[in-house]
Amino acid sequence: MAKIAILSDIHSNYEALTAVLAKCDEFGVDKYVSLGDIVGYNADPSICLEMVRSLDLICAVKGNHDEYASSNDDLMEGFNPHAKRAVLWTKTQLTSEQRNWLANMPLRATVPGTNITIVHATLDSPDNWGYVFDLHHAADNFAYQFTQICFCGHSHVPVAFYKKPISTMSERPIEEILAWTHQSDEGVSPKDTLVSDVLSVRLETGYKYLFNIGSVGQPRNHDPRASFAIIDTDTKEVFRQRVAYDFHTTQKKVLEAGLPERLAARLEYGN
Ligand code: ZN
C-alpha cells in the first residue's frame, strides 16, 4: 500500500508548494491526491499546475477557482472582488490545454483502490461550494459519504470530525476531533501553534472520518505555514503536517503581478 499526500488549495503559491513537496519526499510519500483550487489568488498558476500534473497524481477534483479559471463564466456570482480579479488574471496565464485539464476534473471522486472519497467543498452538494465548519455541516456531509474517509478543503481552515458506528440516545453520533484544529480561535496565539508540526489521527474500524486538511497556498487559521495531510494506508493513520515557507517571495510576486495587496498581506498572517 502507500503513503498518500493530500494537497488542497495550493492557489498558485509556488514557494508553499515547493516546501510541501520537499516535506512529502522526507516523509516517503508515494502518491498524491489534489482536492482542487490549484490556481487562484497568487501569482504562479501555470507552474503550480505543471508541478501538480508531474506528480504521481492518483486522483484530483475541481475547486471553485479552478472552475472559474477554466470556464467562460466571468460573472462569478458570490465571489469576492479580490478573488475575482485574481481569477481573471489567472485566465490570462494559462494555456487552453491547461484550462481544459482543469475544466475536466470531477467535483468529487473515490480514490482508486482506497476507502477514500475526495471533494473540494461538500459531498451533499459539491457544486454549491458550501463550507464544512461545524457538526451540522459534518452531519450533512456524512449522509453522502459511503467510504470510511473523506477529505475536503475549500475553507482553508483545518477541521475534522468522526461518526461513531453506533451511538446511544444520550450520545452525539458525530464528534469533532478538536486536536486537528487546536490552534483555532480559542485565544491561542499564533506562536503557540508553532509547537506542533504534525498531528496524527489513528483510524478505527467502523468509524467514519471527515477531514478538512487546510490550505497549502493561503492558510487562514492564523498560522502562515502551509497545511496538508498524509494518509498511511498501512498503519491506518492520517497526519496533518505544517510547513513554513518563504512567503515574502510569494508576496513580492503577487504585488509584481498587479494582484490585490490584500492577497499578499494575508499570507503573512494566515488569515
Ligand atoms: Zn481555496
Image (cartoon, rainbow, N blue to C red):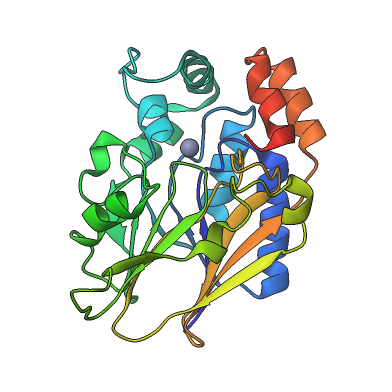
| Residue 142 figure quarter | bottom left
Q: Nearer the viewer, residue 77 or 14?
A: 77
The residue at the point 18 percent across, 60 percent down is: 143
The residue at the point 52 percent across, 46 percent down is: 157
Q: Is residue 11 above or below residue 171?
A: above
Q: Where the C terminus falls, by quadrant?
A: top right
Count how many numbered circles sit on residues in the image: 0
Q: Is residue 112 above or below residue 151?
A: below
On the rendered structure, is 211 left or right of 123?
Answer: right
On the rendered structure, is 174 left or right of 157?
Answer: left
Q: Nearer the viewer, residue 114 or 188?
A: 188
Q: Please provide percent x and percent y for residue 98.
A: 45, 35
Which residue appears farthest toward the front when viewing the image?
170
The residue at the point 57 percent across, 32 percent down is: 45
Q: Nearer the viewer, residue 82 or 65?
A: 82
On the rendered structure, is 187 left or right of 113?
Answer: right
Q: Please provide percent x and percent y for residue 50.
A: 56, 44
